[in-house]
Amino acid sequence: MTVTYEDVASAAERIGGHVLRTPVLEVSPGLFLKLEQLQHSGSFKVRGAFNRILAAGELPPSGVIAASGGNHGLAVAYAAKALGVRAEIFVPEVSSPVKVAGLRVLGAEVNQIGAIYAEAAEAAGKRAAETGALQVHAYDQPEVVAGQGTTGLELMAQTGGVDTVVVAVGGGGFAAGITVGAGTAGGSGPRIVAVEPLLCPTLHEALRAGHPVPVQVSGVGADALGASRLGGIAYDILSRADVQSVLVTDDAIVAARRVLWTEHRVVTEHAGAAAYAALLSGAYVPADGERVAVVVCGSNTDPATLA
């Protein structure tokens, strides 16, 4: 399975009336922040959720089901509520209380199972087989990846084009979608720099092994970037596009989150600041005159922790 530019363009038409065109902020000459944390449900994930559900056509009475560290579940719950569909969400124990509470506010049935995302995903798969509900995967379904890729379409139009897009990676669906939507998968788009926490290195290890492999995940970004294995679709797209993988420490992520708030008044969760951490820490150093866009991908956090 793979995803084409045409798939992303179709997704943009399909979900256009349901998602926000999030703003781009030029914080210094040639450095742009794509503020996807302002999207409905607090992250880019709602793009893929709407595309998957709408592309499925008529849904079973059991509705939709998803496993998530938190943000994907919020997105699926938001989309389901907007479309009048029942939603059942499985989250691991590591999920932020803020995100779990948000799921319940959106009316989803919440099951908190397992220590990490992979265990919640296994439980969700079994439940979907029992109920017949439409499963909305967090990152490894073509419709989900295509939906996330609409961020890349928007970004290129809003900036007039950039040389580099810096984006965080967990399961890889977002980075893969942006790679396709920005035109990079076709060989003519910007460089894609994929940023991962040192303690959640799914893409880094997959590229080193030559295929997706299981990894141990932990750290400040684990509730959103804690997939223990890169998605197959993501590996196919990112490896063929020669995407650059860089790792950042938890300290760098914490520092980047603080700078986003203190200098730009951008509220983000730790995972949402991972891409920016690559620039601030020197894990990725742009060339002179390089136009760089950093995607700030999630804001589901307790604002009191920003101080």
Image (cartoon, rainbow, N blue to C red):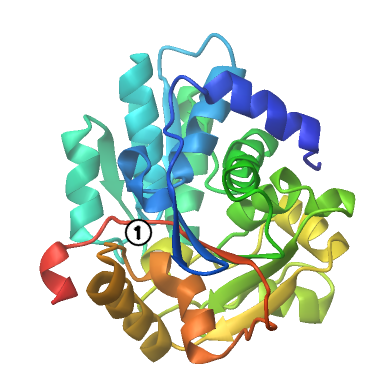
Q: Nearer the viewer, residue 80 or 67?
A: 80
Q: Residue, x 21% and y 44% (percent of image)?
A: 102
On-image quarter of the C terminus: bottom left
Q: Quadrant of residue 201?
A: bottom right
Q: Nearer the viewer, residue 259 or 63?
A: 259
The structure residue drawn at horizontal position 50% and vertical position 13%, both measured from the top left corner, is 59
Q: Is residue 194 left or right of residue 136?
A: right
- Residue type (three-letter) at the residue carrying disc 1: Pro
Q: Residue furthest top?
A: 58
Q: Nearer the viewer, residue 244 or 112?
A: 244
Q: Residue 129, image x and y in percent?
A: 53, 31
- How far from the left and from the top, in percent, is residue 121? 48, 51
Can residue 50 be seen at all in this image of the molecule?
A: yes
Residue 85 at least partly seen: no
Asked where in the image residue 88 lies, by quadrant, the reply is top left
**On the image, numbered disc 1 is attached to which residue?**
92
Q: Residue at x 52, y 77 (%)?
A: 200
Residue 168, placed above or below residue 233: below
Above or below for 76 versus 273: above
Residue 247, given in percent of the width and then of the height, sits at 58, 84
Q: Residue at x 45, y 24 (%)?
A: 131
Left or right, 168 with reference to 65: right
- In this orientation, which residue lies closer to the viewer: 47 or 218? 47
Residue 70, above or below 125 = below
Q: How many marks?
A: 1
The quadrant of the rendering that contains the N terminus is top right
